[in-house]
């Protein structure tokens, strides 16, 4: 379903191991996101963290990681207040 959302300021993702499926293909929507706060579940499904970071390679400006959590500041935020 397409809601024609022009941008997403903050996207929080906690999807209990489905990160790999969400970020393995069709990730062009990332260009609309300013900041992603994500909790990884590699203990449930290996490769979640790796798939996420591969998907954001062309969009990422800065990342912070601690334990199972990461915050990714994406390039789409440039010129806007966060």
Image (tube, rainbow, N blue to C red):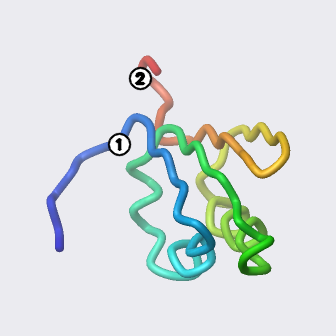
- The image shows residue 20 at horizontal and vertical percentages of 62, 77
Question: Which residue is painted at 71% across and 45% down in the image?
Answer: 70
Question: Which residue is painted at 55% across and 81% down in the image?
Answer: 21
SS at circle 1:
strand
Indicate which disc residue 8 carries.
Answer: 1
Q: CA distance from mark 2 to mark 1?
A: 12 Å
- The image shows residue 54 at horizontal and vertical percentages of 71, 69
SS at circle 2:
loop
Is 73 left or right of 15, judged from the image as shown?
right
- The image shows residue 9 at horizontal and vertical percentages of 39, 35
Residue 4 is drawn in which quadrant? bottom left
In the figure, 36 relative to 14: above or below? above
Question: Which residue is painted at 43% across and 67% down in the image?
Answer: 28
Task: Verify CB contact (< 8 Å) between mark 2 and mark 1.
Answer: no
Q: Residue lying at the far top in this picture: please name it.
A: 81
Residue 10 is drawn in which quadrant? top left
- The image shows residue 3 at horizontal and vertical percentages of 15, 60
Q: Which residue is mark 2?
A: 80
Q: Residues within 10 Å of mark 2 (few under 14, many from 20)?
A: few
Question: Which residue is painted at 65% across and 48% down in the image?
Answer: 60
* Circle nearer the viewer, 2 or 1: 1
Marked residue nearer the N-terminal end (2 or 1): 1
In the figure, 29 relative to 13: above or below? below
Is 79 left or right of 7, judged from the image as shown?
right
In the figure, 36 relative to 9: above or below? below
In the figure, 80 relative to 26: above or below? above
Q: Residues within 10 Å of mark 1 (few under 14, many from 20)?
A: some
Residue 75 is drawn in which quadrant? top right
The N terminus, quarter of image: bottom left
- State the residue in front, 17 or 75: 17
């Amino acid at each position: 379903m397409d809601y024609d959302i022009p941008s997403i300021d903050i996207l929080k993702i906690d999807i209990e191991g489905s990160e790999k499926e969400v970020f393995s293909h069709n990730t062009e929507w990332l260009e609309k996101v300013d900041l992603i706060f994500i909790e990884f579940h590699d203990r449930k499904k290996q490769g979640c963290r790796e798939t996420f970071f591969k998907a954001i390679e062309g969009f990422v400006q800065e990342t912070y990681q601690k334990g199972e959590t990461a915050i990714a500041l994406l390039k789409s935020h440039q010129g806007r207040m966060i």
